[in-house]
Amino acid sequence: MLQYPFYAGIMELMAGSGLVFVMSDFFVRIATPATLPFWAFISGGLVNFFVPSGGGQWVVQGPVFIEATKALDVPIPQVVMGVAYGDQWSSLIQPFWTIPLLAIAGIAMRRVLGYCFVTFIASGLLFGGGLLLVGALT
């Protein structure tokens, strides 16, 4: 409960300073219509380290990527899912979602981080490759 006001503050700092726009704009400039969903995935994963709330993250990244989809003529659902997959993907490397479960089970965080890291790498390859494939087939 205590962490969410901090996330809101971080989100406001990033949105207000334009940092999220700069980060997202970088990915938009290097993307092609086939790779925009993949770069949205990578961008979503990076921004999630600073704004670990899917809704808050979409508030600051959504407008940039919606405009990019229009400019590059990419289906909007592909890019939206890229951002969402990136958000969930990088949550594996900072598994705050496990804290209540670990407390109940009496297990230390260090015992699960290795498993989370392996899953992070495997799912990154799977989702990243899948988004590149979807972009190439569209």
Image (spheres, rainbow, N blue to C red):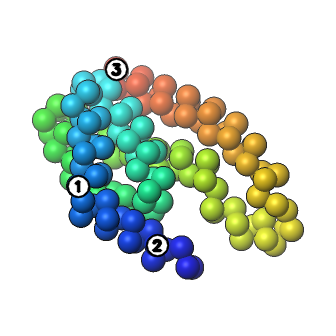
Counting labels gives 3
Disc 1 target residue: 18
Return the disc, 2 or 1, that comes first in the chain's sequence.
Answer: 2
For label 3, the residue is 136
Of the residues shown, which amino acid type is indicated by label 1?
A: Gly
Q: Judge from the rendering whether residue 72 lies leftward or rightward of residue 50; answer left or right.
A: left
Number of residues whose C-alpha sits closer than 10 Å to that of mark 2, classed few (under 14), some (14–19) or many (20 or more): few
Where does residue 92 sit, x and y in percent of width and height? Answer: 61, 48
Residue 124 position within the rendered picture, expressed as x and y whole percent measured from the top left: 55, 34
User: Along the polypeptide, which appears first: circle 3 or circle 2?
Assistant: 2
Outermost residue, left direction? 71
Could you tell me which residue is drawn at 75 percent across and 43 percent down? 114
* SS at mark 1 in the image: loop
Compared across the picture, whether 29 is left or right of 1 comes to left
Q: Amino acid at mark 3?
A: Ala
Q: Nearer the viewer, residue 137 or 107?
A: 107
